[in-house]
Amino acid sequence: MPNPPSDAGRPICTKTGFCTRGTSQSWLTKSWGLPSIFWPTIRSTSASNPSRRPLTSGSRLSTSSLRNASTDLGRINTLLDTHYALSGAYVALGAKVHISWELAETQSTQILVSDRVVIATEDLLTPDADFFSAISQRVQSAIIEVEVVRANRQPLPTLKSYSLLLAASSLMHRSSPQILDRSYEILNHLIDRHPKLAQPKAWLAKWYVLRSVYGGTSEPQREGGRALSLTQRAIDLDPGDSMSLAMQGHVYTHLLDNPDLAKERLEHAITVNPSDSLAWLYKSVVQAMWGDSGDAVTSAARALALSPIDPSLYYYHALHASALLADGQATEALAAAQESLRLNQLHLPTYRVLLTAQVMAGQTAAALDTKRRLEVLSPGFSLATYEKSGNIESRTKQQTILALKTLGNR
């Protein structure tokens, strides 16, 4: 069996530099430089929660010498030990900047995604502009899809750890039993490969939570015990890992029905790392289910603000929608659920939130369409099966049960 090369802490995506193809506004290059403004946004997803991000990026300073040069991708791989390269060119014409960019795999030299855009020069001074977020999301999505395909087709021992973690964390959100099983297999392989790392154990605990949310378990307490053990082992390995603490709170919420311990664990995670978006997101879930619904909306909004270009952004929007629904804001919940489905049309829990919001907003016909779509995606879904999953006493679950009863057998 081949030994997988170590890739702990290795940057997997590098920006090689955006070269200039025009001098009509030379201040853009000399004073600011497109790469100087562009790169922090590409990096921000990794920087916001470094403890839980399998996607990392190389520093701008280490790649600045590659700007304005035609650099061979193989050389980049050798010099920087990186797996993907983001490069491009731009020209400033009047008040507009014409930008072309591409993402390539350094080893195979395959171009994964490319585009050309024209934006106003002033937008370059606004790092949170839609342009930057759109490119960041496309870069992340392209890398994740490559790694998912790789993990589905190749023997796990031959793949690098970053590849396995990217694939597993993506696959677990796809709700198909077969895909969930593959995620489980990958995470267990990672745990065996890196027994002293906390992250794979915390992700596997999340896998148990998601399987329960999808209705895939009839023994939530038993699986909750397994998930709790995983999070405790992760915390023992790294007591300062906010993701493991947050995940333990999530286990107490969904599998062990203990809101008090869930809140305590999540507050601890936020104390350890106030910028951990998952901790804020999971805090909103506890608040929506058993606490102050207004606080739930605030916590979910905080999570979104901390991770605006997360690879699982649809997940954030879905839980934001759930918090809004708990707070009685049906119209706002509708918008958030629709945004979640725009990003991922296969996320089953979002359909339940959307259906509930539609019933609360008086949109019965639309709710019936959503219910039929949910039944197609999840043939075993029904009011009876839904009532048996999760905590039936929570506010959010009661809202959905009432909505399903309102629709009846239509």
Image: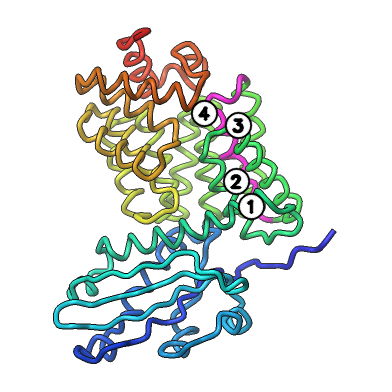
Q: Residue furthest left?
A: 95
Q: Which mark is drawn over residue 202?
A: 2
Image coordinates of residue 167 in percent, x first then y, are: 59, 51
The answer to whether residue 305 of the structure is visible from this angle is yes
Q: Residues within 10 Å of mark 3 (few under 14, many from 20)?
A: few
Q: What is the magenta segment's predominant secondary structure?
A: helix
Q: CA distance from mark 2 to mark 1?
A: 6 Å
The disc, 3 or 1, on the residue closer to the chain's N-terminal end is 3
The answer to whether residue 195 of the structure is visible from this angle is no
Q: Which residues are magenta?
A: 197-218
> For mark 1, what is the residue?
198
Q: Which mark is drawn over residue 214?
A: 4
Q: Quadrant of residue 267?
A: top left
Q: Residue furthest top?
A: 409
277 is within the stretch colored magenta: no
Q: Residues within 10 Å of mark 1 (few under 14, many from 20)?
A: many
